[in-house]
C-alpha cells in the first residue's frame, strides 16, 4: 500500500509541477489542482498510514492520528477557495488581455521554433 | 485583560464583516469613518498588548481552553507584539491615504484591507506552524483581491503572476508541514523546538528537508533572491495604499524565517541547528546586490521603491544570518524603520505621479509639479531615511547592523556589500529627485490640490523616522530584549507558565 501511495503522490506532484510551468492559464490551473491533490494526500499520510484505525480515541484499540485529518480538511477548504479564485482570475485575464497566456501576450516565435514547426508539418 | 492577545485578529475580522452588512455596506463615507476608527482602536489595542507583554512577560492565549501542543495557541511575546503594532501603524497610514479617494476605484476596499490586516496580525501572533499557514492564506487571498482592486490590464497581469506563484508557494508550505509533522510529530513551535533534538538519524534528513522547504516558502514571501522576480512588477502595479501596506508583507516572510529558524531550528536543535545559515549567507548577499542594481536600473519611482524593498530584505537577511542577539536586535530596529519608510515612499510616488500628468513617476522631463515644495520636502525626508543618511533612522539601523558584524569572519563580506548598496541607493535616489523635481519644462497644468488627508497619512508614516532616532534608546532596549527573548527560548518560554502535561 505504501509504495502505491507514495507513487501516486509523486506522479501527481510531478504532473502538477510540469503543468504549472506551462504557458497557458488553463494548464496552469489544472497543474495547481493536481498539486493541491498531491499535497492533501501527502498531508494525510504524514500521520502514518493505517488500516481500520478509528479517528476517535477509545473507539478501538488501534487509532489513527486525527491531526493530519484536521489539517487535510483545512487544506482542502483553502485549496478549493484558491482554485475558484484562480479560475475566475484566469477568465478575467483572458478578457482583459485578449489571450490566455500567463504573461499576457503570446511570445514571439523564434526562428528556431519556426524551422522545427516547418519540419513537423 | 485576559482576551487582549486575540483582539488584534478579532477586531479587524469583525470590522470587515460589519462593513459587508447593510447599515455600513452602501455608503463609502460610513465605510471610511468606521474603518479609520477601527484602525485607531487597533493601534491602541496593539500598543496596550505590547506594553502588557513587555511588563508582565509573554502573554499566551489558548483558544477554547485546549492546552497546547494539541490546542491552538496565540503567543504574544515582545517580537510578535512589536510586529503587530508596526502593522497597525502602517495600515492606519495607508488607510488614511486611501480614504482620500483610492478606495472608491472598486468595491469593498476597506473590508479587504481589514482582512489583510487580520491575516498579517494572525501570522505574527500564532504559536502554531499550521496556523501560520492558515493566516498566510487569509492575508494572501485578501492581498490578491486588493492587488487587482480598481482593475486594468497591468494589474490583471501582475495579479496572475502573483497568485500563481503564491499558490505554488502554499503547496510547498503544506508539503513542508507534512514532512515536519511526520518526523517531529507536532506542529506547535515550542513543542517542535523541544522534540527536534530527539530525532533519529533517518528522520533528521527528512526534517532538514522540511526546514529547508520552509525557507523556500518564506523566501518567496520575503522576496529573497531567486524568488523575488514577482515583487517589483506587483508592487508597481498595485494602487498606492495597497503597495504601502504590502511593505509589511515581505516582513511577514522575514519574521517567519526569524521565528521558525531561531525557535525550532535554532542553536539548541542538535544536529539540525542552524540548517539554513549556509544558504542564507550567499542568498542575503546576492539579494542585497541585486536589489541595489535594481534600484539603479529602475525607470520610475515606484519601481525604485519596490527595489528598495528588496534591498531592505537583503539587509535584514544578512542580520538574521549573523545569528547573534545584537544582530537580531539591529534587524528588528531596521525592520520598523524600513517598513514605515518604504510605505511612505510608495505614497509619495503616487502623489508625484498624479501631479506630473502623463509622465507619471517615470524619470523623464515633464511639466512642473503643482505643489512641488510640499512633495519635495516629503520626498527629501523619505529619501534620506531609506538611503540611510545620518540624521534619520535608516542610518542608525545600518550602523547597528554593521556594529553587530564586528568580530565575525564574514565582516569582509557584510560591510562592503551593505555600504556599497547604500551608495547605489544614494546615487539612484538623488538621480530620481533631481529628475523629478528639477528637470521640468513648462508650467503645471494640474490644479487639483493634494488632499490634506493624503499629506497627513504621509506625515504620519514619515514621522516614524525622526521619532525612531529621538527615542532610539528605549526602542533599541526593547528590540534587544525582544531579540534576547527570541534566542533564549527555554528560559522565557510561554509554555513554562502552562500546567505540565505528559510529554
Image (spheres, coloured by chain):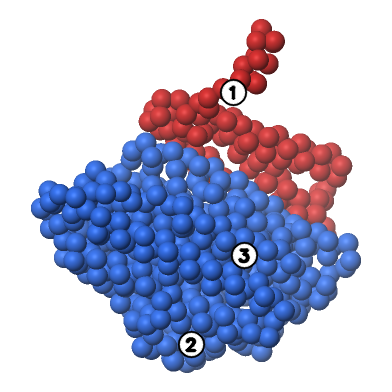
Residue under mark 2: which chain is it in? B
Give the residue displayed 50% in from the left and 34% down from the top: A103
Of B168 and B134, the residue lying toward us: B168
Location of the N terminus of chain B by quadrant is: bottom left
Q: Indicate the position of residue B381 as horizontal and vertical percent values.
A: 31, 72
Give the residue displayed 67% in from the left and 75% down from the top: B412
Location of the C terminus of chain B by quadrant is: bottom right
Task: Name the tint of chain A in the rendering.
Answer: red
Q: Which of the two marks, 2 or 1, is nearer to us in this view?
A: 1
Q: Residues within 10 Å of mark 3 (few under 14, many from 20)?
A: many
Compared to residue B221, the image places residue A32 above or below, namely above
Asked if marks 3 and 1 touch (Cβ < 8 Å), the reply is no
Mark 2 to mark 1 CA distance (whole Å): 57 Å
Q: Indicate the position of residue B468 as horizontal and vertical percent values.
A: 39, 82
Asked if marks 2 and 3 touch (Cβ < 8 Å), the reply is no
Residue A110's tag is: 1
Residue under mark 1: which chain is it in? A
SS of the residue under disc 2: helix
- Residue matched to label 2: B476
Of B363 and B126, the residue lying toward us: B363
Mark 3 to mark 1 CA distance (whole Å): 36 Å
Judging by colour alone, the chain drawn in blue in this rendered image is: B
Q: Residues within 10 Å of mark 2 (few under 14, many from 20)?
A: many
Give the residue displayed 65% in from the left and 72% down from the top: B413
**What residue occupies the far top of the structure in this picture?**
A121
Q: Are marks 3 and 1 on the same chain?
A: no
Amino acid at each position: 500500500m505504501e509504495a502505491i501511495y507514495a507513487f501516486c503522490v509523486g506522479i501527481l506532484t510531478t504532473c502538477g509541477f510540469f503543468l504549472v510551468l506551462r504557458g497557458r492559464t488553463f494548464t496552469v490551473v489544472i497543474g495547481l489542482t493536481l498539486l493541491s491533490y498531491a499535497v492533501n494526500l501527502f498531508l494525510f499520510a504524514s500521520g502514518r498510514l493505517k488500516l481500520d484505525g478509528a479517528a476517535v480515541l477509545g473507539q478501538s484499540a488501534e487509532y489513527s492520528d486525527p491531526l493530519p485529518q484536521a489539517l487535510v480538511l483545512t487544506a482542502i477548504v483553502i485549496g478549493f477557495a484558491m482554485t475558484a479564485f484562480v479560475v475566475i482570475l484566469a477568465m478575467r485575464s483572458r478578457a482583459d488581455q485578449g489571450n490566455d497566456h500567463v504573461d499576457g501576450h503570446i511570445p514571439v516565435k523564434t526562428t528556431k521554433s519556426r524551422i522545427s514547426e516547418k519540419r513537423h508539418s | 485583560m485576559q482576551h487582549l492577545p486575540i483582539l488584534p485578529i478579532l477586531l479587524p475580522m469583525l470590522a470587515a464583516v460589519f462593513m459587508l452588512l447593510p447599515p455600513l455596506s452602501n455608503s463609502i463615507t460610513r465605510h471610511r469613518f468606521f474603518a479609520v476608527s477601527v484602525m485607531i482602536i487597533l493601534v491602541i489595542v496593539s500598543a496596550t498588548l505590547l506594553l502588557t507583554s513587555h511588563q508582565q512577560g509573554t502573554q499566551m492565549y489558548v483558544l477554547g481552553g485546549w492546552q497546547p501542543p494539541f490546542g491552538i495557541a496565540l503567543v504574544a511575546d515582545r517580537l510578535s507584539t512589536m510586529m503587530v503594532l508596526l502593522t497597525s501603524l502602517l495600515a492606519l497610514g495607508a488607510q488614511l491615504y486611501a480614504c482620500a479617494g483610492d478606495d472608491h476605484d472598486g468595491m469593498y476596499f476597506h473590508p479587504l484591507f481589514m482582512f489583510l490586516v487580520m491575516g498579517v496580525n494572525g501570522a505574527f501572533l500564532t504559536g502554531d506552524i499550521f496556523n501560520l499557514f492558515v493566516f498566510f492564506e487569509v492575508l494572501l487571498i485578501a492581498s490578491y483581491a486588493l492587488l487587482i482592486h480598481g482593475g486594468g490590464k497591468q494589474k490583471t497581469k501582475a495579479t496572475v503572476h502573483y497568485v500563481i506563484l503564491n499558490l505554488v508557494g502554499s503547496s510547498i508550505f503544506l508539503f513542508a508541514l507534512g514532512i515536519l509533522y511526520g518526523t517531529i510529530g507536532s506542529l506547535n513551535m515550542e513543542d517542535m523546538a523541544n522534540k527536534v533534538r530527539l530525532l533519529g538519524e533517518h528522520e533528521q534528513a527528512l526534517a532538514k528537508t522540511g526546514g529547508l522547504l520552509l525557507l523556500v516558502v518564506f523566501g518567496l514571501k520575503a522576496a529573497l533572491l531567486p524568488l523575488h522576480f514577482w515583487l517589483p512588477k506587483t508592487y508597481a502595479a498595485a494602487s498606492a495604499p495597497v503597495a504601502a501596506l504590502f511593505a509589511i508583507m515581505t516582513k511577514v516572510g522575514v519574521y517567519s524565517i526569524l521565528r521558525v529558524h531561531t525557535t525550532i531550528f535554532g542553536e539548541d536543535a542538535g544536529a539540525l541547528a542552524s540548517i539554513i545559515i549556509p544558504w542564507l549567507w550567499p542568498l542575503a548577499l546576492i539579494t542585497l546586490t541585486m536589489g541595489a542594481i535594481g534600484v539603479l536600473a529602475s525607470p520610475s519611482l515606484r519601481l525604485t521603491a519596490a527595489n528598495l524593498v528588496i534591498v531592505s530584505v537583503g539587509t535584514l537577511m544578512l542580520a538574521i544570518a549573523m545569528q547573534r542577539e545584537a544582530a537580531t536586535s539591529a534587524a528588528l530596529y531596521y525592520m520598523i524603520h524600513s517598513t514605515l519608510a518604504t510605505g511612505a515612499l510608495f505614497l509619495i510616488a503616487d502623489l508625484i505621479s498624479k501631479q506630473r500628468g502623463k509622465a507619471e513617476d517615470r524619470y523623464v522631463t515633464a511639466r512642473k509639479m503643482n505643489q512641488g515644495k510640499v512633495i519635495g520636502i516629503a520626498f527629501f525626508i523619505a529619501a534620506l531615511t531609506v538611503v540611510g543618511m545620518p540624521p534619520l533612522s535608516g542610518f542608525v539601523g545600518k550602523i547597528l547592523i554593521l556594529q553587530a558584524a564586528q568580530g565575525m569572519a564574514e565582516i569582509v563580506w557584510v560591510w562592503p556589500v551593505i555600504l556599497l548598496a547604500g551608495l547605489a541607493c544614494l546615487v539612484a535616489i538623488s538621480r530620481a529627485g533631481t529628475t523629478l523635481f528639477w528637470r521640468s519644462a513648462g508650467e503645471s497644468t494640474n490644479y487639483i490640490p493634494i488632499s490634506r488627508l493624503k499629506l497627513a497619512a504621509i506625515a504620519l508614516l514619515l514621522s516614524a523616522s525622526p521619532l525612531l532616532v529621538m527615542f532610539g534608546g528605549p526602542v533599541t532596549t526593547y528590540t534587544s530584549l525582544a531579540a534576547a527573548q527570541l534566542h533564549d527560548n527555554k528560559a522565557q518560554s510561554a509554555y513554562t507558565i502552562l500546567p505540565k502535561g505528559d510529554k
